[in-house]
Amino acid sequence: MSELGVAASGLKGDVTTRELERFERTVARRSAEIRATVPSIELTAVVSVDGALVNGVSLDALVVEAAAVALRAVPRANGSYRDGRYETYSRVNIGVVVADEEGVYAIPTVFDADTKSVVELEVELADYRGRARAGDLASAEQTGATFTVSLPLGDAVVAVEPLIMAPQAAALAVGGVQSGPVVRDGTVVAGQTIAVALSCDHRILFAVHGAALLEAFKRHLESV
């Protein structure tokens, strides 16, 4: 057995073993738990962002603003499943996945996102990103989220199926900007779009609720 082990190792070249960091261990454990216990349904939509990209603020801030508007329009999605019941919340607190090519840094919370201007959201997101990379986020800034948004990881990634941060009812992920033909006023023209994926806890949200949330998100972002 030991010889087989050595041979297998040799076929793969030099092997480097690295222990998972604390955050990575937490992600691994929570992901396995959620996948095993939360029955989910996934919905997708394509959103035109031609107007958003020339708006003067970042697409990330506009995505968070649109998510907040959508949660106000579909309050059932701003909730959680708990022991055979679901609860909804009066505050719209959006957890934003802060990540780069090395992995997730943190999921800070934008509290009362529905009450903030898009400029305020942009400033807050920029602050979170900088302090997340420095490991300078307080634990209180990473709790209390009622919904989670994963922002684009780059234009090469068209869509990502988001992981629901149980017990939250749903999570939204946005792909990178894609250029291609779109239909506008009955005419096919060149445009830019993003794919949006929504994962819903099916114990709380049915397809009709998810569709309404995506429609509200799309309508707001395309109106910018």
Image (spheres, helix red, strand yellow):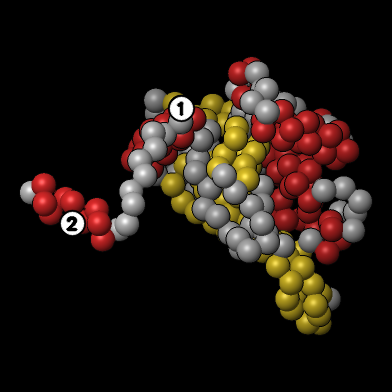
Secondary structure, mark 2, is: helix
Residue 7: assigned label: 2
**Within 10 Å of the Cα at label 1, are there few (<14), some (14-19), or many (20+) other Cα atoms?**
few
Residue at image position (91%, 51%) is 56
Q: Earlier in the sequence, mark 1 or mark 2?
A: 2
Q: Amino acid at mark 2?
A: Ala
Tell whether label 2 touches label 1 (CB within 8 Å).
no
Residue at image position (44%, 47%) is 40
Secondary structure, mark 1, is: helix
Residue at image position (75%, 46%) is 60
* Residue 52 picture location, percent across and down: 84, 56
Q: Amino acid at mark 1?
A: Arg
Q: Is residue 57 above or below residue 115?
A: below
Q: Is residue 9 above or below residue 110?
A: below
Residue 22: assigned label: 1
Q: Quadrant of the C terminus?
A: bottom right
Gap between marks 1 and 2 measured at Cα: 32 Å
Residue 216: assigned label: none
* Residue 221 picture location, percent across and down: 78, 53
For this view, does 171 lie left or right of residue 83? right
Q: Nearer the viewer, residue 152 or 198?
A: 152
